[in-house]
Image (spheres, rainbow, N blue to C red):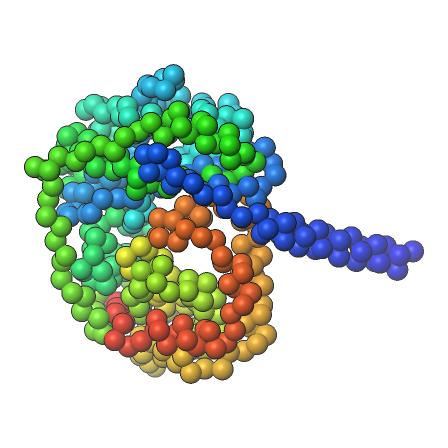
Amino acid sequence: MEGNLRNRFFFILLFTVALTFATAIAVSAEDDVSFSLDNGLRVIVSRGASIPFASVVLVCPLPPITADADRAAAALLNRLLWSGGEGFGTSVSDYEYGMIAMRFNGSIGSQLTPDALLVHYTMPSRHLDSIFRYMAMQWTSLRIDAERLETARRKVAAEEEAAATSSVLRQIMREIEPRLWSDLDYRFRSSGSMQMLKAISEDEVRALHQDMQNPAAWTLFICGDVQTATVRAILDETLGTIAVAAPDASEQAEHSAGENPQLGIRLQLPADLSQRHALVSYRLPPAREFDTAELLLLARYLNNSPGVKALRTGLGDNSLVNVGFDLRDKAGIIYFYAAWDDDPTKGDVVARLAGIAENAAGMDFDGEILESTRKALLIDYWTRRQATQPYALWRAGRIAAGLLEDDLAARLQSIDGNGLKAAAAQLLTSDNRLNLVTVEK
C-alpha cells in the first residue's frame, strides 16, 4: 500500500512538472504584438496570461535632469498624479482611487525609476476602457494646489528618510552613485535633497508634467487576457488623443554633462558603525549595449561561487557577502558588497572582492553550480511570467532601461561558461572599478 502511494505521489509530481513546463512553452510561444498610435505612443501587448485580468503599465521617460530640483519635482509628480481629475467621460477624486482598486479586486500605483515614471493598473480585463481613461486623465487634468503639494512633500520626505536609513548598503550606494555616474543625470539624488523638496513650487511641478507629456516617447505595456483589436480601439479614444505638449523654450535649462567619473580609486567613508563595510562597484554600459542575460547569470553564479563562499567563511558567522546589479538606460552598476566584524587579520576585503570579480574572466566555471543557478533563474522567470502584475512591472522596468524585447529565458538557456568569461572580461575590469570601505569616524 505504501509503495502504491509513493508511486502515485511520484506520478502526480511528474505530471505537475510536465504541466508547468508545457504551460511555459505555450506562454513562450505567444509573441508580443507591437504597434504605435497616431500620436506616437508605442504599445506592446503580451497575451501570455489566461486569467481574466490585465496589468497595464505606462512608461513615461524622464526629461533630461539638469539639477537636484528636477529629481525633487519628479518625486512630487509621482504623488500628485493621483490627486484626481476629470475628462474622457469620467471624474475621480484622490480618495476614490483606492476605492476603485478595492472594488475590482485590483491594484493601482506608480513608481519612479532612475529613467522613467511608471504608472500601473491591474484590473479585470473588461475594465480596460476605465484604465485607459484614468491614465489619459492623469496627463491632461492634473490637480495641484497648496494642500495637495504639501501632502505630497510630507510623503516623499518620509519615504526619503526611511530609504536613507533602511540599510548601510543603501547609504553606501548614496555615496558611490554620484561618483560612479558623475557625468550623467544619475548623479542627482533620486528624490532630490530635503531642502529642495521643501522649495519646489507648484509651477515647477507643472512644468515637469508638461515636459513629460510626450506620447511619442511613452511606451504602454499590456499583459493579460486582452484582444489587440479591442485595445487599439479604446486607446484611439483615450491615450491616443493626447497631443505632445510643447515645452516652453524660454524655461529650458542647459543640460550640463557633469564631470568625468574618477574610476579606479578607493574611497574611505568615516562612519560610526558596529561592522566594517566594503563595496567594489563596476560601471556598466547602457543596458541595450550588452547581453543582460549574461550579466544576470554571471552575478548569480558569482554569488554562489566557491570564492564568495570562502570569503563568507573567512569573514566569520556575522558576515554578509553578496553580488547585485542595477540596469539603467545610460549606465548601470554591478557591485560586490561585504559586511563583517572588524578584525585586521581578515585582510584587505576590498582587494578580495575585486579579485573575485576580476578573476572571473579566467576562471573555470563549475558545471553543477552553473546549471543549478540557471535553473533557479528560469524558475524565477516562469513564476513571474505566469502572473500579470509582476511580469508587467518587470517588463516596464526593462523598457525604462531601453530593453523592449523579452528574450531572457531563451538567452539563459544558451549561455555557457565561455559566454560568462566574455561577459566578465567586458564588464569587470580594474579601470572600470570604484571602491569604498568604511573606517572609524
Q: Quadrant of residue 173?
A: bottom left
Residue 143 rendering spot, x and y as whole percentages = 26, 23
**323 relative to 40, above or below:** below
Residue located farthest toward the left when viewing the structure as drawn: 250
Q: Quadrant of residue 208?
A: top left
Residue 429 rendering spot, x and y as whole percentages = 31, 76
- In terms of depth relative to the viewer, which is nearer, 325 or 317? 325
- Position of 125 with respect to 141 (left or right) is right
- Position of 390 with respect to 83 (left or right) is right
Residue 370 rendering spot, x and y as whole percentages = 54, 72
- In terms of depth relative to the viewer, which is nearer, 354 or 410? 410
**236 relative to 278, above or below:** above
Residue drawn at the location 25% of the way across and 75% of the way down: 431
Residue located farthest toward the front when viewing the structure as drawn: 38
Residue drawn at the location 47% of the way across and 39% of the way down: 222
Residue drawn at the location 50% of the way across and 76% of the way down: 417
**281 relative to 409, above or below:** below
**170 relative to 93, above or below:** below
Residue drawn at the location 34% of the way across and 71% of the way down: 427
Quadrant showing the N terminus: bottom right
Q: Could one spot residue 368 in this view of the protein?
A: yes
Q: Could one spot residue 320 in this view of the protein?
A: no
Quadrant showing the C terminus: bottom left
Residue 133 rendering spot, x and y as whole percentages = 39, 25
